[in-house]
Amino acid sequence: MKIVVVGWGTTGDVYPVLALSKRLLERGHQVCVCALPLYRDRILEIGAEFHEIGVSFDLPEFHAAMDAIIPKRDPLAMLRFIVEEGIVRHGGKWYNDCSTAIEGADLVICHSIDIPAQEAAIRNGTPWLTVTYCPSTIKCLDFAPYPFPNWGRTFNAIVWKLAELRLSASVDTLFNQFIVSVGGKPRHSVILDEMYSPHLNLIAASPVICPPADFPSNHRITGVWHLASPSYIPPTELVNFLAEGPPPVIISFGSMGGSNGRETTEILIDAVKKSKQRAIIQAGWGQLGTEDTPPDIFCTEYVPHQWLFPKGRCVVHHGGAGTTASVCRAKVPSVVVAHHADQPYWGKRLSDLGVAPRHLHRRSLTAERLAKRIQQALETPKMTARARVLGEQIEAEDGLTTAVDLIESF
């Protein structure tokens, strides 16, 4: 098949679909990946065709958006802002560039929230499948939408209905305004139902991390999709740091940004000192780190998770779906500092599974609170033992093969 894969979002959203693209190429399919220019080199490295989506990525603008998102306490207000700034604002250009790439394709695969790419597929008459990384927003009576407790199917049905009403008057309206602007038909309950492909929505998450649920038939959980980096050669300074002492605490907030990188770095360093640990701090999009650090703290640019995480005692992270899966696969405990979106859900899942303390929110992060959680993770042997068992279970999964089999069956 000629398959167009659209990479929407930050690194944690894009890299899993690049792993899927690589596996599709290995199965003999022709794959074109549509994405922002910052992912060009990685796309070409896996052997796929690259089609540029001409939406500029401006890091200061991204930091400003993160500054606006993090303080919000209402998940709906947070979601509306993400939809306005991350999708609708550049939706016309995204739609047009995807439309060009899709011409002549047999199949389109895109993120479940990537409405512009979905509409481009619909206008071109091309079948489309979706990918999602978190099942918490898929309407299912086996659980209530996060953060509500599961008090039975009747209670869950009421909460889902209330969520639908709130979303319909806010976020769904934004999406439908965009859909109509490109000649599409308005959708009913976009976020809870119709942003997912009616044919097949692939849930790229581990069934051992997510609680079991009887999802509608178009939703299939596959297991996690990992993009390997076999050619990675670590810098000598990093190798030497790891060899000079006991395993460190690893801190990585990935694609989470904000203009307060210096302040965040100071909190992290202070927390590490209070917990009396060695640490590695990854810069990420938030540009964390400083040149003036104690000798037991090492600041570094990007290092592949699958290489770095197993070398730590625990990982302090933002709770993104991809990073969460990578930490679990590394068989080490977590400390989650959730910034927005689905991250509190993953923080709670890790806590419920006994591989992490109760998560923190970024807006309430202090050195004292973080140090306390790092100490709790390191001083609770059961957490380390459970993390090891969980990692072995995830290692046994083959999410990419499951996903490709489902795609080919479709």
Image (cartoon, rainbow, N blue to C red):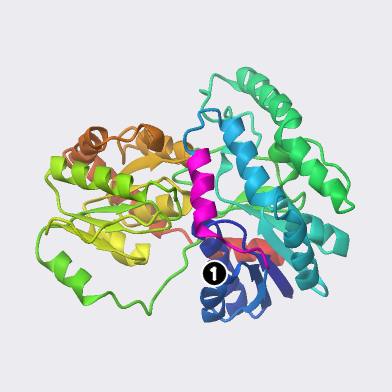
- Occupied quadrant, residue 39: bottom right
Residue 68 image offset from top left, x and y in percent: 52, 39
Does any portion of residue 206 appear in the rendered image? no
Q: Amino acid at mark 1?
A: Leu
**Residue range highlighted in magenta:** 54-69
| Horizontal and vertical percent position of residue 87 | 68, 50
What kind of element bears circle 1? Answer: helix
Residue found at x 25% / y 41%? 383
- Check if residue 285 falls in the magenta segment: no
Q: Quadrant of residue 264?
A: top left
Q: Nearer the viewer, residue 240 or 135?
A: 240
The main secondary structure of the magenta stretch is helix
Q: Where 261 falls versus 341 (above or below)?
A: below
- Answer few, some or many: residues within 10 Å of disc 1's Cα (few below 14, many 20 plus, some between 14 and 19): few
Percent of width and height locating residue 136: 56, 38
* Residue at the disc numbered 1: 38
